[in-house]
């Protein structure tokens, strides 16, 4: 089982390292999202650069990057704590992608995808939370920060055996949002709008 867990962690990182935003922007002839807009290769920045279709494709594939390795590991009988490590590995791949000079995004969608196989009810609750906060604030980063901050409480309520893995993922994503937190505190965080 130990060798299987290590293999699953490595595969999850390699899956996470596929930068959906960069590849889809190339496909649609859009600027590199790492060098334009917010400089973040995620669905929100892709929306600013190219609109709904490339953004939705980016979101879809970013979710799959987290979902596929965790789902496969779940059906292989890997215990919850190690499933959390596999999910973290997928998120680390998104944040520090091997194939893209280790310049990645913030892993919100990838983390959400990683939660679907083990607790779809919690994943839906997280989506609902994000949508409500975003509807009120129009700030994607604020919605993400509040959502991941609540995720461990949702996990404890719905699937307590996954609380520790969810805390691991939430801490990673909040750490990745440090610059957004600073801008939110100073009132100059950018609301979502298209650049063109």
Image (spheres, rainbow, N blue to C red):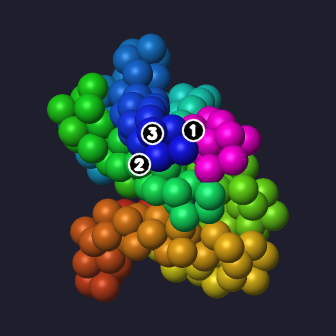
**Hey, which quadrant is residue 17 in on the image?**
top left
Closer to the observer: label 1 or label 3? 3
Residue behind mark 2: 89
Q: In the image, which residues are magenta? A: 66-78
Q: Give yes or no for contact between labels 1 and 3 (Cβ–Cβ under 8 Å).
A: no
Residue 99 in the image: above or below residue 17: above
Residue behind mark 3: 3
Mark 3 Cα-neighbour bin, 10 Å: few <14, some 14–19, many ≥20: few
Which residue: 40% across, 22% down? 23
Sequence-wise, which precedes: disc 2 or disc 1? 1
Residue behind mark 1: 69
Residue 81 is left or right of residue 21, and the answer is right
Which residue: 23% across, 41% down? 103
**Hey, which quadrant is residue 174 in on the image?**
bottom left
C-alpha gap between disc 1 and disc 3: 15 Å
Q: Is residue 43 visible?
A: no
Residue 186 in the image: above or below residue 8: below
Which residue: 72% across, 56% down? 118
Residue 131 is left or right of residue 147, and the answer is right
Q: Nearer the viewer, residue 79 or 43?
A: 79
- Residue 39 x %, y %: 26, 45
Magenta stretch secondary structure, dominant: helix
Which residue: 64% across, 84% down? 153
C-alpha gap between disc 2 and disc 1: 10 Å
């Amino acid at each position: 089982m130990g060798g299987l867990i290590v293999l699953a962690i490595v595969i999850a990182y390699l899956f996470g390292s596929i930068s959906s935003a960069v590849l889809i922007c190339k496909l649609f002839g859009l600027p590199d999202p790492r060098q334009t807009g917010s400089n973040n290769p995620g669905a929100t920045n892709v929306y600013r650069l190219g609109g709904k279709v490339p953004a939705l494709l980016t979101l879809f594939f970013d979710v799959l990057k987290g979902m596929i390795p965790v789902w496969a590991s779940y059906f292989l009988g890997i215990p919850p704590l190690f499933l959390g490590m596999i999910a973290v590995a997928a998120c680390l791949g998104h944040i520090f992608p091997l194939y893209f000079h280790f310049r990645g995004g913030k892993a919100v969608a990838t983390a959400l995808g990683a939660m679907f196989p083990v607790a779809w009810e919690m994943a839906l609750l997280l989506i609902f939370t994000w949508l409500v906060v975003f509807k009120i604030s129009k700030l994607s980063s604020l919605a993400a920060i509040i959502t991941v901050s609540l995720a461990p409480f949702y996990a404890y309520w719905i699937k307590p055996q996954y609380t520790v893995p969810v805390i691991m993922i939430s801490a990673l994503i909040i750490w990745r949002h440090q610059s957004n937190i600073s801008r939110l505190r100073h009132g100059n965080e950018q609301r979502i709008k298209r650049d063109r």
